Image (tube, rainbow, N blue to C red):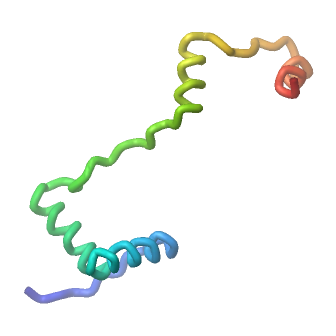
Amino acid sequence: MAKVSTNISIDADVKKQAQELFAKLGMDLSTAVNIFLRQSIRSQSIPFAITAEIPNNVTFSAMESAENCSDVYGPFDSVDDLMEALNA
């Protein structure tokens, strides 16, 4: 099969980290990209789950507090009242 050259834009730091990882796995970036593309074609999809970032425990706690209307401040009658609460 004939090889062709393709240009893609990658963040410089991401490229460096990926090259280091793939070198540890015994391959170069080109080989890793080819593996990804072949697996995508084979599965007719992105070959891994793409999901939103999972919130950390602090964020989960804040979300739970908001849903339960606990530990919530306000409403405020003025900006001064809001600022006083924020600086407390």
Please tell me which residue lies in front, 6 or 82.
82
* Total marks in image: 0
> Does 48 sit above or below residue 53?
below
Task: Answer above or below: position of 37 versus 88.
Answer: below
Looking at the picture, tell me which residue is in the foreground, 47 or 88: 88
Residue under the image location 26 percent in, 74 percent down = 32
Q: In the figure, residue 53 lies in which quadrant? A: top left
Reply above or below: 19 against 36.
below
Q: Viewed as shown, does residue 55 lie left or right of 47?
A: right
Q: Is residue 73 left or right of residue 6?
A: right
User: Where on the picture, by quarter, is residue 20?
Assistant: bottom left
Quarter of the view holding residue 44: bottom left
Residue in the image at 56% along x and 11% along y: 68
Q: Is 65 situated above or below 8?
A: above
List x then y, in percent, for residue 47.
21, 56
Residue 82 in the image, given as x and y percentages of width and height: 84, 21
Residue at (50% x, 75% y) in the render: 12
Going 8% across and 86% down the picture, which residue do you hit? Answer: 1
Q: In screen coordinates, is 24 left or right of 73?
A: left
State the residue lying farthest toward the front.
24
Q: Quadrant of the C terminus?
A: top right
Q: Where residue 78 sits: x, y (%)? A: 87, 16
